[in-house]
Structure formats: structure tokens, C-alpha cells
Image (cartoon, rainbow, N blue to C red):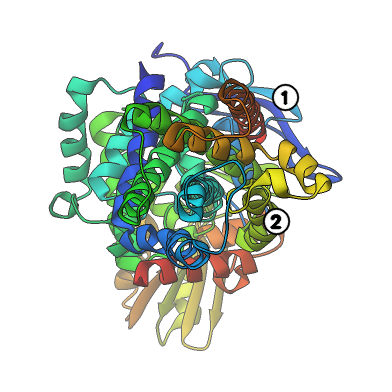
């Protein structure tokens, strides 16, 4: 691939289901080697957008190229250059882990002489080597997910799509999976596109995040920039001389809002962590004692609220997802 | 190259699954066995087949083998719905492999499993006293394969338009059982009422039963070449329809 080319180039891509516009004229490009997140609530159009990019659904209008190939005109080329980890489980439960991988290698035309080596490589990476010859039916949800990731990598895709990779998994497994994804990017330079409705996931994993709601991309930037765009952090200083310290703090040009209120001083600033030492220094000079300092960074939740006027809350899980989680739990138990 | 290995793996997958589900092997032999062992031996002395010198049990054995093939192969086609529910179908559908390779691999795989069942049934039938024309054994196996592949494809075609297994009972009662009963597997068509005969002649399984009867017993009421031609046409039709419907599955 041309190193200057974008991994994915999307131009006014639209998908309608009857009256409903699931993806509304989205234009965006994904750079090579980045982890790109699509963050939005259930039903925002994330999965539909991905489905079009992986050639599973045909766009109603617009164009997109993946790895330089047109999704409508060169679907086979697109399919060969991508790996997909679906939102829902997609393993053959009656086969062993190894057999699942062998089957995938065959379907993606991995050379016979390469298959064994590659399977060992990916299965080692997701730490399932000792389970290779066990039937998938006996695997836990997290193990299945890891196996799916290994499978998605088997044909050395340039771009990996992960649709809600950690839905229904426990926090520990979730972190584990984040580590694999980071490793992929760092060690293999794989471009990763993932959808999520977990703020923490988008925040800790993605280089850039597009917030998507009602089929449109509302804003796009690195998680840090997105959070900074809200006008900064909140520093709360507990001190008996709040009013006095407030007067000092107001002298700093960067202090946007300074509000003293009984025993506490709240200051809004950009890059709060860098301003705390300055404030402490100022307090020390004026011999004002400080009991505690806390810093509240805006979260992506705040960003989402700012741009859409609503929050993504986990309790807002759609029925579909709860069913999914239950199915996963159930199939993992058998 | 990758198409060939995809076909091979689809076939292998069916067989791995088949041999891992021991209860399924026994389960699907149960009904044909009861037919043959109880109905066959029970009616053996009560029924004379006009124009056929052998016993009733011998007459019905090829029919029961065909029944085994029909049940097993329709089932292994329809079971694709489970692949869909458990998500595995998606993995195959988004791969760069041509969908006709997937259909063909599955149909050869499902048919191989069905023929293994058919051979087990054949062994049981021989044990119960069916004579066998050994020279014709290989052609008989080929016909068994042809019948099975057609019905796996039929099952696949139906499965690709169904969302879940709810409709399976419907298929059993309104398609599979009539196909079986109308095929002349358990009674001679020549002595059936005219109307039943007409319907029997549009039942593709009739030609399968008659072909097997000819190859195993040397007795048939339909010339073998007609049976073979009809079976080949039916095979082409069901495979074509299955490929077509499979190509239409979105997502």
C-alpha cells in the first residue's frame, strides 16, 4: 500500500432502510496505522457503517475505499485485505480452536506451507496455545473473543475491524483485549477501526474518536483534544482561606472561572494538571495552607453530552444487547 | 486454489461435526431401523409384491435406505440455520470465498455423512436378509451420493430463507414425510390408486428409490436410465436454487 494513502477513505456514504437513514452521508478518512474509534449509542449507525466498509451491506449512496479498493466495485479485494471481529460470536462451537483457525486460513487462501506457522503465531499471541485442541463449546466468553481476534489476524489483514469487541465481557478481560489491540498496532502496524459505546474503551484505546449519533459524525478528534475542547478541567482546592486564595488565583490569566464557596475553591482551567503546581506555589507564597487538591478531567461522557445533549449510559443498554449478553453467558456455560 | 481448499474444509467440517455428534448418528438411524426391523419383518409374510419374487422386507430395504438419506441430508442442509444463529455463517459469508464453493462444500459434506448413514442401514438390511448384488454396489453408492447432495441443497435453499428452526417441524411434516411416503419406498406404486401414482411420479425421491431398488435387487418399475436422468436434473435444480438463494443472503 502506498504509505501516503489513507487506510480508509469515506465519501458521503449513506445507508437507508426504507424510511430510516441509518448512516447519513458520512465522510471521513482513517490514517494508516491508527486506532480509529466510532463512539455512539446503540442504534447510532456504527455497525451499519462498518457493515458497508466490510462489504456486507451495499451503500444506498456515496463511495468508500478500503485499503485503496472500492467497496462496491472490488469487494473481493477489500475482503482479502481486512479482518473482521463481529459484534456477535461467530465461531464454530463444535470445532476445536485449532480447527476454527485452519478453516479460516483455508477460506482466506493462506498458503498451505504457511498455515501451521501462522496459527501458532496468532494463537500464542492471544495466549490460547494450551487450549488449541479443545472444542470451542467449552470456552468462556473472553476466550472466544480472543480466539476470534486471533482468527481475524490469520490472513495478515492490513485493516482490522472490531465491532463492539468487549460487549458483555468482564472488566479484566476487557483490559486484556485492549492490550492485544494496542500490540497489533504497535508491533504490526495494523490499522484498527473499532466501534464501541464504552467511553473508557474509546478513551484509553483510540488515537482518534469520531462521535456518531443518528447516523452522522458529530465531531472527530483525539480523545484528549475532544476533552480539552470542552474548555478544560476543574480544580477543586480545599482551604480555610478560600476567598483569599481566590483573589490570588484570579490574577492568573488562564484561570477561567474562579468560585470560592465555603472551604473550597473551584477553578476552571485548561490542562489542569500543569496549573496545580502554580496554584500551590502561589498559596505557599501567601502562606495559605491547603488541605487537599483534586482535579476533575472532563470525560468523553461530558464530550458526548456536550455535542449531543444526552449521555451514553450503560443502563441504556438496548434489549438487543442484553439478549446478546445473555446469549454469550449462556453459550459460555454449556 | 482457495476455492478448492474452501470446498475441502466445508466438507471436512461437516464430517468432523458428524462424527462428534454420536447421538445424532444413532438418533437418525432409529426411525429407519424401526421401519425395517418391525414393519419389514412384521409384514414380511403378509404382503406379496406383484411382479417381484422376493420378500416384502427385501422390497422395502432400498426404500428405507433412501429414507435414511432423505432425513439425514435434509437435516444437514436445514441445520445451516443454527450456523446463522450461532453466527458462524457470517464468518463464511464475508470471506473472499465464492458462495457457490460454500454451497458445494456443504452439500458434498452433508451428503457424505448421509451416505455413511445409508451404508450403516444397508449393513443392517443385509443382516436382516436382504440379498445384495455386489457388482452394483459402487453404482448404488454413487446414486446414494447423488440423492443426498440434492436433498442437502434443498435443505440449504430452504434454510437460507428461514430465520430460525421454528419452521423445521413444518418441513418435516409437509415436505419430508410426504416425499418419503409417496416415493413408493414402503409399498409398490403399481398397485396404488391412479392419483397416488401421478403424485409419486413428481416426487424426486421415487426415482431415487427405484434406482436403488434396481441396483441392489435388480427390480424396478421405472427404467434405470430415466431414474438417473431425473435424479441428475433434480440435483442440478436444487444446487442451482441453493447457490442462488445463498448468494442473496445479505449480512
Q: Where is residue B29 in the image (x, y as percent from the top left)?
A: 41, 59
Q: Name the residue located 52 percent from the left edge and 88 percent from the top edge.
A: A262
Q: Position of residue A289 (x, y in %)?
A: 32, 81
Query: In 3D space, how far apart are the residues under numbered discs 1 and 2 (Cα atoms)?
Result: 25 Å
Establish if A38 lies above or below A307: above
Q: Where is residue A322 in the image (x, y as percent from the top left)?
A: 56, 70
B235 relative to B182 in the view: left or right: left
Establish if B115 lies above or below B168: above
User: What chain letter is assigned to the residue under label 1?
Assistant: A
User: Total of numbered circles in the picture?
Assistant: 2
Q: Residues within 10 Å of mark 1 (few under 14, many from 20)?
A: some
Is disc 2 placed on a helix, strand or loop? helix
Is disc 1 placed on a helix, strand or loop? strand
B85 relative to B138 in the view: left or right: right
Q: Name the residue located 62 percent from the left edge and 51 percent from the top edge.
A: B180
Q: Name the residue located 36 percent from the left edge and 44 percent from the top edge.
A: B131
* Residue most extreme to the left: A130
User: What chain letter is assigned to the residue under label 2?
Assistant: A
Q: Mark 2 points at which residue?
A: A308
Q: Mark 1 points at which residue?
A: A62
* A6 or A16, nearer to the observer: A16
B19 relative to B109 in the view: left or right: left
Amino acid at each position: 500500500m502506498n504509505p501516503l494513502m489513507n487506510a480508509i477513505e469515506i465519501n458521503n456514504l449513506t445507508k437507508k432502510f426504507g424510511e430510516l437513514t441509518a448512516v447519513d452521508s458520512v465522510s471521513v478518512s482513517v490514517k494508516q496505522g491508527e486506532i480509529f474509534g466510532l463512539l455512539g449509542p446503540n442504534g447510532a449507525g456504527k455497525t451499519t457503517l462498518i457493515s458497508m466498509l466490510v462489504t456486507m451491506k451495499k451503500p444506498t449512496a456515496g463511495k468508500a475505499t478500503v485499503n485503496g479498493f472500492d467497496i462496491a466495485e472490488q469487494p473481493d479485494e477489500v475482503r482479502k485485505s481486512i479482518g473482521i471481529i463481529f459484534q456477535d460470536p461467530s465461531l464454530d462451537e463444535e470445532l476445536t480452536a485449532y480447527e476454527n483457525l485452519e478453516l479460516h486460513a483455508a477460506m482466506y487462501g493462506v498458503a498451505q506451507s504457511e498455515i501451521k506457522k501462522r496459527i501458532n503465531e496468532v494463537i500464542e499471541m492471544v495466549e490460547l496455545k494450551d487450549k488449541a485442541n479443545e472444542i470451542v463449546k467449552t470456552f468462556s466468553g473472553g476466550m472466544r473473543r480472543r480466539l476470534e481476534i486471533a482468527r481475524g489476524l490469520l490472513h495478515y489483514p492490513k485493516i482490522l475491524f472490531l465491532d463492539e469487541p468487549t460487549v458483555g465481557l468482564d472488566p479484566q478481560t476487557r483490559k486484556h483485549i485492549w492490550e492485544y489491540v494496542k500490540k497489533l498496532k504497535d508491533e504490526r502496524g495494523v490499522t484498527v477501526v473499532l466501534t464501541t459505546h464504552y467511553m473508557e474503551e474509546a478513551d484509553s484505546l483510540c488515537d482518534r474518536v469520531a462521535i456518531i449519533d443518528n447516523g452522522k459524525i458529530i465531531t472527530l478528534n483525539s480523545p484528549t483534544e475532544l476533552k480539552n475542547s470542552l474548555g478544560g478541567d476543574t480544580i477543586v482546592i480545599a482551604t480555610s482561606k478560600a476567598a483569599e486564595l481566590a483573589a490570588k488565583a484570579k490574577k492568573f490569566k488562564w484561570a477561567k472561572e474562579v468560585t470560592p464557596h465555603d472551604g473550597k475553591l473551584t477553578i476552571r482551567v485548561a490542562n489542569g494538571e500543569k496549573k496545580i503546581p502554580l496554584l500551590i506555589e502561589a498559596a505557599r507564597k501567601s502562606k495559605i495552607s491547603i488541605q487537599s487538591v483534586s482535579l476533575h478531567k472532563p470525560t468523553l461522557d461530558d464530550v458526548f453530552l456536550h455535542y449531543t445533549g444526552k449521555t451514553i449510559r450503560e443502563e441504556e443498554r438496548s434489549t438487543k444487547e442484553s439478549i446478546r449478553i445473555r446469549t454469550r453467558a449462556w453459550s459460555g456455560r454449556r | 486454489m482457495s476455492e478448492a481448499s474452501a470446498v475441502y474444509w466445508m466438507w471436512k467440517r461437516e464430517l468432523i461435526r458428524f462424527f462428534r455428534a454420536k447421538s445424532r448418528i444413532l438418533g437418525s438411524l432409529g426411525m429407519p431401523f424401526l421401519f425395517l426391523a418391525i414393519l419389514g419383518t412384521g409384514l414380511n409374510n403378509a404382503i406379496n409384491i406383484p411382479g417381484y419374487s422376493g420378500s416384502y422386507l427385501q422390497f422395502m430395504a432400498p426404500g428405507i435406505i433412501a429414507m435414511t438419506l432423505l432425513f439425514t441430508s435434509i437435516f444437514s442442509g436445514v441445520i445451516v440455520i443454527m450456523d446463522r444463529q450461532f453466527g458462524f455463517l457470517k464468518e463464511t459469508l464475508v470471506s473472499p470465498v465464492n458462495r457457490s464453493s460454500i454451497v458445494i462444500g456443504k452439500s458434498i459434506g452433508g451428503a457424505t455423512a448421509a451416505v455413511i448413514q445409508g451404508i450403516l442401514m444397508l449393513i443392517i438390511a443385509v443382516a436382516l436378509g436382504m440379498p445384495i448384488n455386489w457388482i452394483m454396489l459402487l453404482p448404488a453408492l454413487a446414486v446414494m451420493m447423488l440423492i443426498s447432495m440434492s436433498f442437502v441443497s434443498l435443505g440449504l435453499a430452504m434454510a437460507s430463507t428461514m430465520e430460525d428452526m421454528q419452521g423445521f417441524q413444518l418441513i418435516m411434516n409437509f415436505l419430508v414425510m410426504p416425499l418419503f411416503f409417496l416415493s413408493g419406498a414402503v409399498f409398490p406404486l403399481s398397485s396404488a390408486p391412479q392419483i397416488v401414482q401421478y403424485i409419486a411420479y413428481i416426487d424426486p425421491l421415487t426415482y431415487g428409490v427405484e434406482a436403488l431398488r434396481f441396483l441392489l435387487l435388480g427390480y424396478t418399475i421405472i427404467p434405470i436410465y430415466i431414474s438417473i436422468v431425473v435424479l441428475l436434473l433434480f440435483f442440478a435444480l436444487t444446487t442451482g436454487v441453493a447457490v442462488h438463494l445463498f448468494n442473496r443472503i445479505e449480512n
